[in-house]
Image (cartoon, helix red, strand yellow):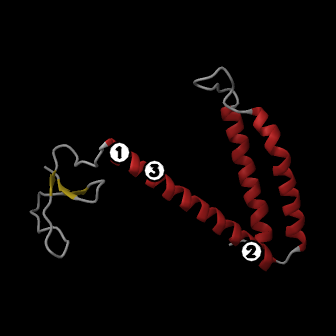
Amino acid sequence: GFNPKHAIPLSNLTILGGAIANLLFNCPKRHPKADRPVIDWDMILIMEPSTIAGAVIGSFMSKFLPEVVITTLLSIVLLLMAWRTLTKGVKLWNEETEQQERAGIEMTRPAGYAPVQQTPTGTPPARGPQQQLLLGPNGVMYQVP
């Protein structure tokens, strides 16, 4: 792999290419429910100065700090973002599960499929050459008819 001093600019260049492609693709589009463009130009005007300032500060830091410090800082940022994503995902999962329980929605078996009886060890019983099994969304195995 690349060392951080080379990987960061290469990553930024890749992100720039993707951003330009998205801009060209989304610029002519209109919002489906409101009479305005899909791109919120006012939000860009608010966010871009701080984004550019962060990029400038980061490029100065990458020139003066040793690679160990840069790698450690990038690892800390990655861990914080992963933790934030995980906690948000768990929170959304819990909220959706609660909403489904309140609405009385259950995960049901697919139409035409019969549940497979499992042995005491938790494995499915032996099946014939023509039988296929499907793992349903609720974790139960179903026999394909």
Q: Amino acid at mark 3?
A: Glu
In which image quadrant can residue 77 be found? bottom right
Foreground: disc 2 or disc 3: 3
Q: Amino acid at mark 1?
A: Arg
Q: Which residue corresponds to mark 3?
A: 95
Q: Position of residue 115 (x, y in %)?
A: 15, 56
Left-right relation of 14 to 108: right
Residue at 85% x, 68% y: name it: 62
Q: Which residue corresponds to mark 2?
A: 71
In which image quadrant can residue 36 be found? top right
| Numbered disc 3: secondary structure | helix
Residue 7: give its label.
Answer: none
**First-in-chain label (1 vs 2):** 2
Residue at 64% x, 25% y: name it: 30
Left-right relation of 114 to 35: left
| Numbered disc 1: secondary structure | helix
Q: CA distance from mark 1 to mark 3?
A: 11 Å
Residue at 49% x, 58% y: name it: 90
Q: Position of residue 144 (x, y in %)?
A: 17, 52
Q: Which residue corresponds to mark 1?
A: 102
Q: Position of residue 63 (x, y in %)?
A: 89, 69
Q: Amino acid at mark 2?
A: Thr
Residue at 58% x, 24% y: name it: 33
Q: Residues within 10 Å of mark 2 (few under 14, many from 20)?
A: some
Outermost residue, front direction? Answer: 102
Above or below for 76 versus 27 = below
Q: Residues within 10 Å of mark 1 (few under 14, many from 20)?
A: few
In which image quadrant can residue 59 be found? bottom right
Image quadrant containing the N terminus: bottom right
**First-in-chain label (2 vs 3):** 2
Foreground: disc 1 or disc 3: 1
**First-in-chain label (1 vs 3):** 3
